[in-house]
């Protein structure tokens, strides 16, 4: 595709539900990043993949957060037992390699009720 | 660890006026610095980046920024604001190298352009 796509664009979950957020990076991009953007804040790093390898997950806020990229392309961010504090926009970015420009998707807005 | 401080969460200018958005960084090693723009319900778009070459960096849409090591600043400017510049702007820092290419963002500055 022409850019990074994310689905769904909006997700409403009841507290305690599990959610899965999908990111389709630009074809051929090796690096993939997930960021969390709370309301009125800048994005904060969650995790980074190089191909299928998760090289940095230092930003994941708890063990309820899990990300995967099994074939080195599409990535899924999973949040188990969602809490209200998980409400945020989740941004995915990809780059050709780790030192190139990161291209961002439009984000998934998660609202936990 | 690196960090970014954006001074002013909201800046309002008149159309045709100078735009100045302030960013100060903290980094223990030479940083890479970025400015991104975010329009409502859209992802972040890179405006410009500093990667240790020229200290005055020109970006898209007439924006530019100057890296000043002595002031640890990377302020974004545009000589003449357009209505289409109204958006949220984020300054970000990265210290480079492998997974350290993750970006650390400031809290953002909302730019309003008045007719």
Image (cartoon, coloured by chain):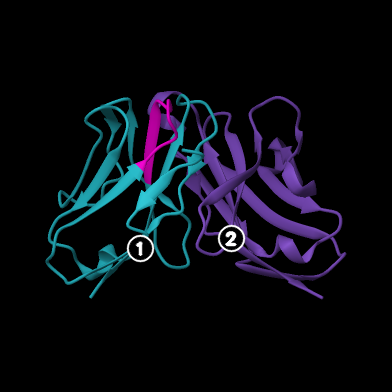
Chain colours: A cyan, B purple
Q: Nearer the viewer, mark 2 or mark 1?
A: 2
Viewer-nearest residue: B58 or A20: A20
Q: Quadrant of residue A50?
A: top left
Q: Position of residue B40 (x, y in %)?
A: 55, 64
Q: Are marks 2 and 1 on the same chain?
A: no
Report the span colored magenta: A24-34
Q: Mark 1 — residue?
A: A88
How far apart are the two marked residues, 2 and 1, measured between alpha carbons?
A: 17 Å
The quadrant in which residue B26 appears is: top right
Q: What chain letter is assigned to the residue under label 2?
A: B
Any magenta on residue A39? Answer: no
Q: Check the picture and name the quadrant holding the C terminus of chain A.
A: bottom left
Q: Position of residue A47 (x, y in %)?
A: 32, 40
Q: Position of residue B45 (x, y in %)?
A: 58, 47
- Drawn side of residue B113 relative to residue B50, left or right: right
Q: Residue at x 35, y 63 (%)?
A: A88
Residue at (86% x, 58% y) in the render: B80
Above or below for A108 versus A102:
below
Q: Is residue A27 magenta?
A: yes
**What residue occupies the far front of the structure in this picture?**
A1
Q: In the rendered image, which quarter is residue B33 located in?
A: top right
Identify whether B82 is placed above or below A77. Answer: below
For disc 2, the marked residue is B39
The percent coordinates of residue B106 (x first, y second) are 53, 53
In the displayed structure, does residue B88 sit left or right of residue A73? Answer: right
Circle 1 chain: A
Between B16 and A105, the one lying in front of the other is: A105
Q: Is residue A95 above or below residue A76?
A: above
């Amino acid at each position: 595709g022409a850019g990074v796509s994310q689905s769904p664009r909006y997700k409403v979950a009841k507290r305690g539900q599990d959610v899965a957020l999908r990111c389709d990076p630009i074809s051929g991009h090796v690096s993939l990043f997930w960021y969390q953007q709370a309301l009125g804040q800048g994005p904060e790093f969650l995790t980074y993949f190089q191909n299928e390898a998760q090289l940095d997950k230092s930003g994941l806020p708890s063990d309820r957060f899990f990300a995967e990229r099994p074939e080195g392309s599409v990535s899924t961010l999973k949040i188990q037992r969602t809490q209200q504090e998980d409400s945020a926009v989740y941004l995915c970015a990809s780059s050709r390699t780790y030192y190139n420009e990161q291209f961002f998707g439009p984000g998934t807005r998660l609202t936990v009720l | 660890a690196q960090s970014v401080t954006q001074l002013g969460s909201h800046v309002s200018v008149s159309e045709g006026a100078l735009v100045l958005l302030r960013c100060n960084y903290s980094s223990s090693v030479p940083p890479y610095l970025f400015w991104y723009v975010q329009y409502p319900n859209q992802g972040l778009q890179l405006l410009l980046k500093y990667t240790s070459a020229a200290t005055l960096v020109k970006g898209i849409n007439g924006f530019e920024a100057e890296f000043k090591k002595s002031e640890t600043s990377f302020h974004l400017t545009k000589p003449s604001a357009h209505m289409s510049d109204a958006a949220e702007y984020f300054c970000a820092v990265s210290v480079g190298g492998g997974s350290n290419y993750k970006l650390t963002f400031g809290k953002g500055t909302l730019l309003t352009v008045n007719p």
